[in-house]
Amino acid sequence: MVGKKVLVVDDDPKIRALIRKCLDIEGLAVVEAADVPSAFAQLESEAFDLITLDLHLGGGDGFDVARQVRYSSDIPIIMVTGKDDVIDRVVGLEIGADDYITKPFHVREFLARVRSVLRRAETRERSAPAAPETPADPEAGVEFDGLIARSERLELLDRDGTAIELTSGDFKLLNAFLQNPKKALSRERIMDLIDGPEWNPLDRTIDNQVARLRKKIERDPMRPALIKTVRGVGYILAADVVRTGAGAASKRA
């Protein structure tokens, strides 16, 4: 982990100093921000390997920062807050935070979480597919139930051609189903597919993510016909999946 850079966002200088001291032990470079505008300014000017993020900040809150980061980046995020609230934890994880720790925290626990999050990020980078030798077709994608998903563009089009707004977490979850159509996937298998085998979210995180995705793609989210629940197992994408785009043979999965 030596040489990696961490952005520490917290309005309490004592907490920033404590986190800096913890991260110094691991040989990590630290940049501090005391509020939301400062955090955004740092993110625009430098590249970071990890963000530790307080929820209660001046000029906004940690959720604002997390949403903006997740819209354009997969930088790991650990939310650090004094509010031990289940709803806050779930919302933070749904937005895309990689972990959550409450104040006061033990130095060893904090460092263990930092190491774990950075290891998972490194695993994702190593397992990412190599860039193709020929340019990818930006129109290539898959169609299911009238929806069109294009991974190259991180784009999902509705049945009338309107773009559906998805977070990076939504798209990872959708891709897991699109790559495994008509296969029942356990929650543990979905975890492996979207973030690697070391990911350890709260018990209901996958269920909450599926519920959010259903609201965006189902004709009737209360009676889901695309992503169905398989009792005692997990979930299944019940739709046919057809490859689209120039040069793509019409292949139904």
Image: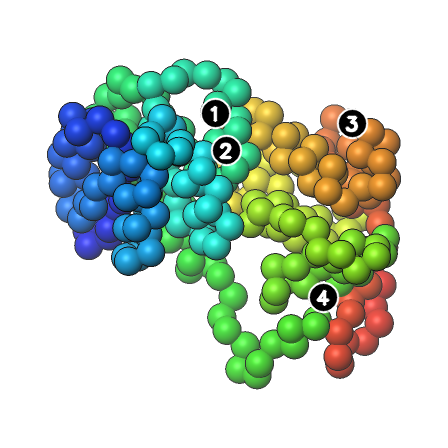
In the rendered image, is residue 195 in sight?
yes
Residue 45 vs residue 202, the one in the foreground: 45
How far is mark 2 from mark 4, CA to CA? 28 Å
Q: Residue at x 53, y 82 (%)?
A: 133
Q: Mark 1 points at which residue?
A: 89
Disc on the earlier residue, 2 or 4: 2
Q: Is mark 3 on a helix, strand or loop?
A: loop
Q: Name the residue under label 3.
A: 231
Asked whether, in this view, residue 156 is left or right of residue 158, the answer is: left
How far is mark 1 from mark 4, CA to CA? 34 Å
Where is residue 167? Give x, y as percent.
Answer: 58, 47
In the rendered image, is residue 176 in sight?
no
Disc on the earlier residue, 1 or 3: 1
Q: Which residue is drawn at 40% across and 49% down?
A: 75
User: Is the Cβ of the residue at disc 2 closer than 8 Å to that at disc 1?
Assistant: yes
Seen as rendered, the residue at the extreme bottom is: 134
Callout 1 amino acid:
Arg
Q: Mark 4 points at which residue?
A: 141
Q: Name the residue under label 2.
A: 93
Q: Which quarter of the picture shows residue 153?
A: bottom right
